[in-house]
Amino acid sequence: MHKRYLFFISLSYSYSILRPLQQEIRKRGDEVAWFLTEDCPNWLTVDEIFLDTIADAMLYNPIAVFAPGNYIYDFIPGVKVAVFHGYPVGKRGEKGKKLDDHFTIREWFDIYCSQGESSTQIFQNLAQKQEFFKVYETGWCKVDPFFISNVQKRKTDTPTKTILYSPTFSKKISSVATLFETIKMLSERREWNWIITFHPKITDPEILEKYRALAIERSNVSFEPNNGLPTFERADIMLCDSSSIIMEFMLLNKPVVTFRNTNPGPHLLNVLHETEVEEALEKALTYPSELLKSISEYTHFHESHRDGRNSARVLDAVDDFIKNHQGRLKAKPLNLFRKIKQRINAGYYYW
């Protein structure tokens, strides 16, 4: 039977997360459409189905709706599936204090697709306690392309090395303001290329303008959206702070230099002062063997599946849920205030 699915996205990073899942849906002979909230840029291609109103999404009547973000419209038909926008790396320093925000149950979803050892058991414990959702360890659909083609190369083939700078948006831990002068100085005196990509939630106009101006001024600096794997492949190493994007980049066996990381470890070259950044970048470009070993151990802990079939497992999870669990679980909490607020924000006033 022909199946219809819906992608619900509110931020631009969702495209690279969901397109591998779209590919698997099409491979199975099924169909998927995209619904974008008002503040999400439309980067869809001509062959992708765009539903631009809630009414269209309702009429589309999908069997499942996938969201990489923290919320989803409960009133759209279909099983609600959380596929996440990163890994639980404790970027806010939750380690030893409380659970990573990754594990916050916001009462919107029927299925959580966990990624590996770092996430599955915690979600299963929460599911046993709350009883209104199921957990399936599928791996993250975004990283399927990382493992289905020959992208596990260490360094780029160009003699001039490239550094990817991709800071987090969280203001208390972001390096975006602190490291500007360091990056500017290094772009002027070192023969390194720079790719600067910002999380879509970094919206400070003064910061944005400074980095845009640097990219205009310096031919070895580009300021652009992060397209996931295609962006990662162009870089030899990454400079970051505490963003979960670090994990994604390290899946390619490439080193990361971090600035005041909230959860440092042997898988990172972490520094505490701007004056240490240059030396750490130099070391990272040598690809130290012990560092690469630590990177491998760390990434396997977070992403257990390396066969390029994570998207397939996500769809299989939906089929299993519909067959064996839909309508048999405890009802979700009423969540009335959030539902009313969501309907007001969406301009949907029906119940």
Image: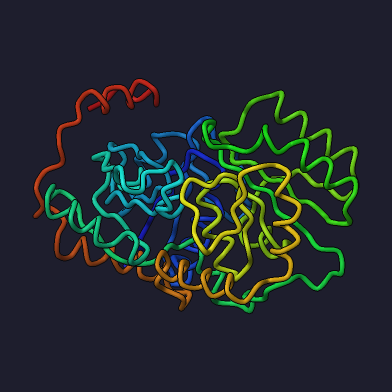
Left or right of 253 on screen, residue 25: left
- Whether 48 is drawn above or below 8: the answer is below
Using the rendered view, name the quadrant where residue 106 is placed.
Answer: top left
Count numbered badges in the picture.
0
Instruction: Say which of 162 and 313 sits in front.
Output: 162
Q: Residue at x 44, y 65 (%)?
A: 25
Q: Position of residue 134 (x, y in %)?
A: 20, 57
Q: Position of residue 51 (x, y in %)?
A: 48, 42
Left or right of 330 on screen, residue 274: right
- Whether 135 is drawn above or below 173: the answer is below
Instruction: Say which of 317 and 290 sits in front.
Output: 290
Q: Position of residue 296 (x, y in %)?
A: 51, 73
The colour scheme is rainbow
- Whether 253 is drawn above or below 224: the answer is below
Instruction: Say which of 176 and 308 sits in front.
Output: 176
Q: Position of residue 129 (x, y in %)?
A: 12, 50
Using the rendered view, name the quadrant where residue 209 is placed.
Answer: top right
Instruction: Say which of 48 and 109 sits in front.
Output: 109
- Which quarter of the rendered picture does the C terminus lie within? top left
